[in-house]
Amino acid sequence: MESRASLRVCIIFLLLHGAILTAVSQPKTYFVAVNGSDANTGLSIGQPLAKIATAVGKLTPGDTIYVRGGTYITTAQIGLSSGGVDSTRRTCLLAYPGERPLLDFSSIGTPRVSGSADGIRLTGRYWYIRGIDIKGAPHNGMQINGGWYNIVEFCSFFENRNTGLQISNLGSYNRIINCDAYANRDSSSASSYDGNADGFAPKLDNGTYNYFYGCRAWQNSDDGWDGYVRPSQPVAGKDTMTTVIENSWCFANGYLANGRAGTGNGNGFKMGGGDAKNSISNGDSLRHRMILTNCLAFDNKVKGFDQNNDRGSMTLLNCTGYRNGSYNYAIPGFIRVTSTLTVKNCISLASPGVTLAGVPNAIVAANSWSAPFTGATEGDFLSVDTAGVRGPRKADGSLPDVQFMHLRSTSAFVDAGAAVGLPYNGSKPDLGCFETGTSTSAAVTAVGTPSEFYLFQNYPNPFNPATTIGFHLPSMTRVRLTVYDLLGRTVAVLVNTEMPAGSYAVSWNASGIAGGIYFYTLHAGTFVSTKKLLLLQ
């Protein structure tokens, strides 16, 4: 009896041990190439699969797919369900390093509004998608449909027949980093021709805390960003349907790829809201909490920053509106008594201007149209020439360097803003979306001994797990370079010593640090400068 009991215990142990081994098995890497074959295993670069969908069908949580460069004529929607384990073990769909794959969905068929006609339909959690171009889908280029905690980075969505990237069905906590959406055009029916295709659309029934950083949206037939809500408040009774857009550009929306004006709305950042009063039962109460920082809207057919009947809280900090067709900033309607409107450190130039008349208790301060300022002029800026705004991104996916809408050092808007919790150089924040000193025009090209103190933006940014921080010292100086979290707690001290004049680059490996937003500060004598960095995990 004792031996049989021992045998049973051993069998149970082996079964459990096998299950544990399976659970912690090493993630696999699959390869896909235009010259691959689905008869291959896909487990080596020399035996690639031909289709992404075939590789997806082989995945277990935490696996990775590398897609080689080239054009993939894709005849069916790619569905991404399941996903990773958590933020430390994501399932990945990545461009092979140094290459750029294009997924062309044009051959799927005629334009449709059905979700089955999206190019990529992401319903899972903890996916990481990077470096992929998507065009020609009959519906959205990508739809995050109910997916949570996903990262989409350095991708582009163009010439799709609805929105470039849409978030719906309570999709929440997704991060869209350094992506482009352009020349998307809706033609689903004569009555809505041009009227649905946005660049990015956290709209209708999307969830909360979706975050866009370093993105561009241009020449989409409807709007650049659309936060329109319908048919009901997804998060019932609370102003917690939140979207954050940071360091992003939005231009020429409402115009088509050929430059002709379309029939869509043509707004830049449409912040939310539902239909006009009485058009649906709750049309006058729908709330989308929008937070926009360091955003730039210009040359959109109608408005730059548009309320669109949003009854929720709206926060605009250090934004710039230029030459939009009607208003640069248009928030003329009321908001709910539980909501707030905050507009600080913003600039308006070359349009009918600003209308904020509908919100009597708005917090509006330190803007170019507010006292003591008398308004912005072209002379405040290094350039109002838009050359380069459509240019290629840097190797890490970050936005190209341009002089457009950067303030001259002589502008009254330099060091004239209100402290709003964003990093800045000098004694106070500047107005507008670009802080003086963050352009690379002078500092990057300096040779020999630097003539001034300077702290560079870390590179790459966002990053995982390592990044480099550069700075200039014009003289022998005591230097302290420190990384802080959002609560001001010290995360790492990278430099704490006296250093001679010169140009320096310091690496920080953030392995083991939780993903999120951090700040780094350079103290060099009396010089102090702080910048933001974003760690992806």
Image (cartoon, rainbow, N blue to C red):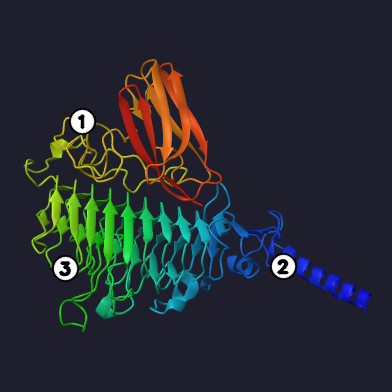
Q: Is residue 180 visible?
A: yes
Q: Secondary structure at mark 1?
A: loop
Mark drawn on residue 39? 2
Q: Position of residue 247 (x, y in %)?
A: 32, 49
Q: CA distance from mark 1 to mark 2?
A: 62 Å
Residue shown at the point (36%, 53%) measured from the top left: 215
Specify the amino acid type for callout 3.
Answer: Val
Specify the amino acid type for callout 1.
Answer: Ser
Q: Secondary structure at mark 2?
A: loop
Quarter where residue 142 is shown: bottom left
Please state if 491 lies on the left or on the right of 351 as rendered. right
Mark 3 sits on what residue?
337
Between 265 and 304, the one lying in front of the other is 304
Mark 1 sits on what residue?
409
First reached walking from the N terminus: tag 1 or tag 2: 2
Q: Position of residue 43 (x, y in %)?
A: 70, 59
Residue shown at the point (39%, 78%) measured from the top left: 112
Q: Position of residue 528 (x, y in %)?
A: 32, 29
List the single residue furthest toward the bottom. Answer: 281
